């Protein structure tokens, strides 16, 4: 599904979990810049619709790979090499796929708990590491993984998800340290509330809710600059500082 | 993660008069449409809506199901050589322009806001300042895909009976999945424009008639505060695409926004302020020709997000009618005199002459003649009485009202204004309905 346009891309970008609302918003920014994109997600028909959209919006090349990212993660180095060949190189890798799940279900059902951990952490780190090995050698580029403010403090309502998202941030922070001498970068972005299908069962609206487009802009910028842990939007750094600081004898009285 | 319906009490139309609860689903992919649409029935009808720029209740289904189409916003194909674009129904005109303009293309026609979806542009067969030269949006639609609630899916083209019902069909003939239309070539993104003042509405007609052959875009702002010998004074602005200038698309985000409802005591003053830029033009009119980017020329009000909040929490109506050429002069004068005397109209109204292009849809609003549009703040009885008086003038002039703007038209006026409505009704999907349709189809 290569685009006929052979002009040189501004960036060559791999997006894992390309069909999420945040990923689609991010991909559109790259498309408008004239990037070459590799979109990875499960549903091939939806990937095709997304690829058509991004081509019309200016992407010079759009490739798709229909893949179960959790199942394929142990094969991450081979896939990553394949995509690098298809794009003629890789500048940025966005790890966006994830699974919110519910804590109540996770506490009762080991399959739910395993899925939350696998999707948000244990398979995600395999993709990050495979990407890091490419960046380490080429000495440029970035990994941007989506973490969450839920990863900043364990809370009764979603500690399975929070722990996994906190874990990926810690892993990426370590990668950023490891890559620093080479000039390549790694960033964990921690969004707060985002209006996406993942949060459709929550009550939405209000000042703290961000659009996928807003988060997409932050992810795009994170690929170029900023520290290893970025909050999206920035106000969440202050909010989470407060939440982390509340002593447990107070915190345990809340229903957060 | 399958999309389902959630109760919402925040879904309102642009006029914000009706506050109701809806069950809303917002699909992200077109493969979800079929399942959602098949769930609708005559006893529990649904409606697909876009960016909800229709003013009244044609885009509302209080207490019932609504599919919010705005996340179905992908382009499917764009051929930069032919200008043919196919895109999902939730793509906004604004987003389409971001792709069209840098490649030397423009929408065939556009309403005064770019924040409408393609599906909405078809369902209301929207028109713009270039109606006399380009016709309505529907005239440039080459194909569309429609889902019926019985599970049937149609790809329609001009000439199909269901196509004629769907263009201007207010979303009642099925749910539009995608629209294909032919864009129009532009040499630049700028417009060579000029403003001409007139001291009386009769003068407007003379100037408009003379301008329409020489200018692709024309429309007039009319002062609704002044009566007597200067009733209907205003400014006619006209323009053509400039051969000089860059092909630069507009800035996507509005520059300013109205964050909250205007409080009651501030209403009059704030409304005046909001239209200040335009009023400024009225006072210190540009003497000679000027060049302006299409963003300012075609979409002046889009610069202020949520400007509808200026009319306060009770909302407002817009009254838009068209009168045939034979009655337009006297009828428009009478309408303006009535509005000025009531003191209820917004400071400015819009006047525009439509061309004689044959209508594309059975319910297309534009017809040859003159259209007048004026905002009226909702003050309940008083407001409804004024509009009833205006209805009388429109009816005796043989005119019609624009469903996209309407929230209170009596069934009789709708039916006399749209003589093909019975033919249209035969194409209505029994599983789809709106507050507007329930009111006018009885």
Image (spheres, coloured by chain):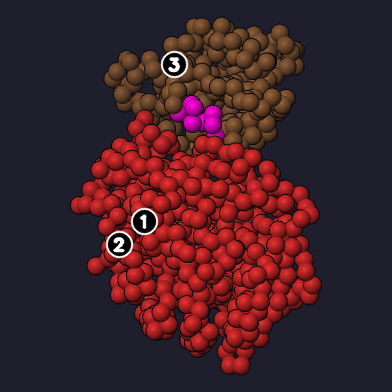
Chain colours: A brown, B red
Determine the CA span between mark 1 and mark 3. 44 Å
Q: What residue sits 30% from the left and 55% below the top?
A: B427
Determine the CA span between mark 2 and mark 1. 9 Å
Q: Is residue B122 above or below residue B81?
A: below
Label pair 1/3, CB-CB below 8 angstroms: no
Chain letter of mark 3 equals A
Q: Is residue B130 above or below residue B6?
A: below
**What main secondary structure does the magenta stretch of the protein show?**
helix
Q: What residue sits 47% from the left and 74% below the top?
A: B322
Q: Secondary structure at mark 2?
A: helix
User: What residue does disc 3 label?
Assistant: A68
Q: Point out the stretch of residues depicted in magenta.
A: A46-53
Label pair 2/1, CB-CB below 8 angstroms: yes
User: What residue does disc 2 label?
Assistant: B423
Residue B192 in percent (x, y) is at 74, 63
Chain letter of mark 1 equals B
Q: Residue B165 bears which disc, if any?
A: 1
Residue A49 located within the stretch drawn in magenta: yes
Nearer to me, B85 or B391: B85
Instruction: Tell me, yes or no, whether dots 1 and 3 are on the same chain.
Output: no
Looking at the image, residue A119 sits to the left or right of residue B189; the answer is left
């Amino acid at each position: 599904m290569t685009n006929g346009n052979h002009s040189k891309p501004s960036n060559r970008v791999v997006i894992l979990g390309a069909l999420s609302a945040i990923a689609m918003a991010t991909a559109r920014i790259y498309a408008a810049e004239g990037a070459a994109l590799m979109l990875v997600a499960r549903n091939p028909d939806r990937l095709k619709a997304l690829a058509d959209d991004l081509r019309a919006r200016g992407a010079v090349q759009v490739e798709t790979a229909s893949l179960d990212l959790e199942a394929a993660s142990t094969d991450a180095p081979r896939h990553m090499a394949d995509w690098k060949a298809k794009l003629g190189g890789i500048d940025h890798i966005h790890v966006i796929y994830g699974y919110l799940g519910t804590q109540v279900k996770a506490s009762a059902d080991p399959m739910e708990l395993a899925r939350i951990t696998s999707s948000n952490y244990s398979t995600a780190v395999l993709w990050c590491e495979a990407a890091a090995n490419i960046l380490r050698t080429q000495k440029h580029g970035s990994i941007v993984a989506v973490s969450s403010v839920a990863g900043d403090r364990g809370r009764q309502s979603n500690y399975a998800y929070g722990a996994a998202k906190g874990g990926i941030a810690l892993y990426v922070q370590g990668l950023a340290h490891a890559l620093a001498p080479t000039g390549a970068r790694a960033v964990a972005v921690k969004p707060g509330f985002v209006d996406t299908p993942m949060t459709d069962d929550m009550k939405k609206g209000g000042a703290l809710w961000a659009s996928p487009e807003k988060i997409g802009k932050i992810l795009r910028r994170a690929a170029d600059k900023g520290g290893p842990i970025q909050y999206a939007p920035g106000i969440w750094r202050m909010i989470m500082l407060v939440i982390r600081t509340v002593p447990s004898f107070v915190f345990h009285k809340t229903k957060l | 993660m399958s999309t389902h319906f959630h109760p919402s009490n925040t879904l309102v139309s642009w006029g914000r008069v009706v506050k109701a609860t809806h069950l809303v689903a917002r699909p992200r992919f077109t493969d979800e449409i079929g399942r959602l649409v098949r769930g609708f029935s005559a006893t529990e009808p649904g409606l697909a809506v876009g960016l909800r720029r229709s003013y009244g209740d044609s885009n509302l289904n209080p207490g019932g199901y609504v599919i919010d189409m705005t996340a179905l916003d992908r382009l499917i194909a764009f051929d930069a050589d032919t200008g043919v674009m196919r895109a999902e129904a939730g793509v906004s005109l604004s987003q389409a322009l971001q792709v069209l303009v840098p490649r030397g293309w423009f929408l065939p026609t556009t309403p005064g806001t770019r924040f409408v979806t393609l599906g909405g542009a078809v369902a209301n067969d929207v028109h713009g300042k270039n109606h006399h030269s380009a016709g309505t949006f529907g005239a440039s639609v080459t194909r569309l895909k429609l889902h019926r609630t019985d599970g049937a899916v149609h790809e329609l083209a001009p000439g199909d009976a269901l196509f004629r019902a769907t263009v201007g069909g207010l979303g009642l003939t099925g749910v539009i999945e995608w629209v294909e239309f032919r864009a129009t070539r532009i040499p630049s993104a700028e417009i060579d424009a000029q403003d001409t003042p007139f001291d009386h509405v009769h003068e407007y007609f003379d100037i408009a008639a003379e301008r329409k052959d020489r200018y692709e875009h024309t429309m007039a702002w009319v002062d609704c505060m002044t009566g007597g010998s200067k009733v209907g004074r205003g400014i006619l602005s006209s323009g053509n695409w400039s051969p000089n200038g860059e092909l630069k698309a507009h800035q996507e985000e509005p520059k300013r926004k109205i964050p909250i409802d205007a409080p009651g005591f501030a209403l009059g003053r704030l409304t005046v302020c909001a239209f200040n830029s335009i009023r400024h033009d009225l006072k210190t009119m540009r003497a000679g020709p000027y060049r302006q980017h299409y963003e300012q020329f075609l979409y002046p009000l889009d610069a202020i997000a949520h400007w509808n909040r200026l009319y306060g929490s009770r909302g407002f109506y817009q009254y838009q009618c068209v009168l045939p050429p034979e009655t337009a002069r006297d009828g428009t004068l009478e309408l303006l005199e009535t509005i000025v005397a009531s003191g209820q109209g917004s400071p400015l109204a819009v006047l525009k002459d439509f061309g004689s292009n044959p209508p594309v849809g059975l319910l297309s609003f534009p017809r040859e003649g003159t259209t007048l549009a004026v905002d009226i703040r909702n003050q309940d009885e008083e407001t409804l009485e004024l509009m009833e008086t205006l209805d009388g003038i429109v009816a005796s002039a043989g005119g019609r009202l624009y469903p996209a703007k309407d929230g209170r038209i009596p069934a009789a006026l709708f039916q006399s204004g749209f003589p093909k409505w019975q033919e249209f009704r035969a194409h209505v999907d029994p599983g789809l309905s709106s507050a507007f349709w329930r009111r006018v189809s009885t």
